[in-house]
Amino acid sequence: MIGITATVPVEIIYAAGRIPTDLNNTFITGSRPNRLISRAEAAGFSHGICAWIKGIYATVMDRDIRNVIAVTGGDCSNTIALGEVLAGEGINIIPFEYPLHRDRDFLKQQMDGLAQTLSATWTDIAEAKSELDRVRGKLKRLDRLTYLENKITGAENHLFLVGSSDFEGDVAGFEQRLDRFLAEADARAPMQEDIRLGYLGVPPIFSGFYEFIETIGGRVVYNEVQRQFSMPYGHEDILDQYLSYTYPYDAEGRLRDIAEAVKERRLDGLIHYTQTFCYRQIYDIVLRKSLDVPMLTLEGDRPGPIDGRTALRLETFVHMLKERKGVF
Ligand code: SF4
């Protein structure tokens, strides 16, 4: 098993016959994520460090994961120090870096390095890619069922797309669950919400977030970053695929992707989720300046149900959008 701190070319891990596990997903879907945060704090991580970093650290220790691919460029600068702490605990750290300006040669070098470290051949990587492409195509269908046919909830969309960062360590099992779900969702009657929302930023640390929005007349029909994990671009070339992935590079690609979604998915408003103590909060300035759509910025700190203040802000935002749209 190889832990990954963020989305990496997972095709290489599968081609090497190893099992990837997205440490963020393992942390947040575990039975007691707050206990893991306490464990990290007991080990010396300060209160002022983002909960995801603490969760990743404690997940590695708790599950005795011996190998971790740490994304040291294009994701989170905290990962550099986290990698050093884990290395000090005897964990084998394999660094992987995305180039800020989408430099093709640099990315190729990084992928070659990862393939070499894991002893994966490019023939096997191509084979793994074609298998994953088939599943990625089905995730694209799931996304269309969400925003075009209106048969899938925001939470269902989120869960399947977020799971595609590692295909839950079992591509065949993931595909079977997805097939069953698509067949069931296809047969549903379309949902009819008043307000169509886009969700921007890292996945929410809250639970019950999407469900709450649906109780107040809204539905998330675009999960920006989770959709990026599913890589719906359909490129033949694996380098093109990872160069199209918007999240690790400069904001321009994200802005283009979001603007397209606003139009194509007829979004009434956007929710920008930010994580307490995360440098990515600063992107709120860029998003607000560049996107001409009503936007609500939320902040989450620790795992748990959405708090009263967040619920009230969501209610007020959706109410404002309903007024704006003349829906009552
Ligand atoms: S939420 Fe921000 S600070 Fe936390 S791990 Fe992600 S990028 Fe890093």
Image (tube, helix red, strand yellow):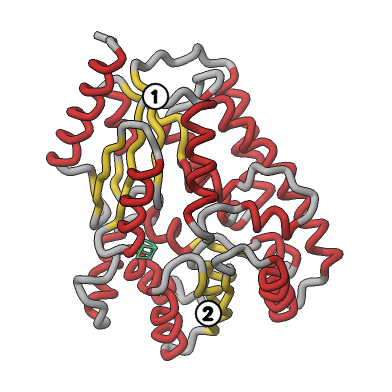
Q: Position of residue 65 (x, y in %)?
A: 50, 75
The residue under label 1 is 196
- Locate the N terminus by quadrant: bottom right
From the viewer's perspective, is residue 196 above or below residue 122? Answer: above
Q: Looking at the image, is mark 1 or mark 2 nearer the viewer?
A: 1
Instruction: Name the residue: 29% across, 29% down.
Output: 213
> Which residue corresponds to the image point at 27% horizontal and 71% vertical from the top-left?
49
Which type of secondary structure does the marked residue at label 1 adopt? strand
| Residue placed under numbered mark 2 in the picture | 66
Amino acid at pointer 1: Arg
Q: N-terminal of the two: label 1 or label 2? A: 2
Q: CA distance from mark 1 to mark 2?
A: 43 Å
Q: Looking at this rendering, what residue extends furthest in the right direction?
A: 123
Residue type, mark 2 in image: Arg
Question: Residue 194 versus residue 141: which sits nearer the camera?
Answer: 194
* Residue 174 versus residue 31 in the image, above or below: above
